[in-house]
Amino acid sequence: ALHATVAKQNSLAETLEAVQESSRVKRRLFCS
């Protein structure tokens, strides 16, 4: 159970990073 929670948190963190990356890219596109 603990391992599943850690895995879930890891994938959640990865998803957040991906979202931040894509929003950064979008901002770059809007600014240019």
Image: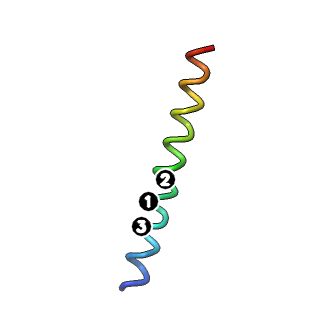
**Taking 21 as reference, is 14 above or below it?**
below
When asked about the image quadrant of residue 29, the answer is top right
Q: Position of residue 18 (x, y in %)?
A: 54, 47
Other residues around mark 1 within 10 Å, as few (<14) / some (14–19) / many (≥20): few
* Residue located at (51% from left, 33% from top): 23
**Taking 6 as reference, is 25 above or below it?**
above
How far apart, in angstroms, are the residues tagged by discs 1 and 2? 5 Å
Task: Tell me the kind of residue under disc 3.
Answer: Gln
**Taking 2 as reference, is 8 above or below it?**
above
Q: Position of residue 14 (x, y in %)?
A: 52, 57
Task: Tell me the kind of residue under disc 2.
Answer: Thr
* Residue located at (48% from left, 67% from top): 10
Element type at mark 3: helix
Residue to which mark 2 is pinned: 15
Residue to which mark 3 is pinned: 9
Q: Earlier in the sequence, mark 2 or mark 3?
A: 3
Residue to which mark 1 is pinned: 12
> Of residues 11 and 21, which is closer to you in this image?
21
Return the residue found at the far top: 32
Other residues around mark 2 within 10 Å, as few (<14) / some (14–19) / many (≥20): few
Horizontally, is 13 left or right of 21 in the view? Answer: left
Task: Tell me the kind of residue under disc 1.
Answer: Leu
Quadrant housing the C terminus: top right
How far apart, in angstroms, are the residues tagged by discs 2 and 3? 10 Å
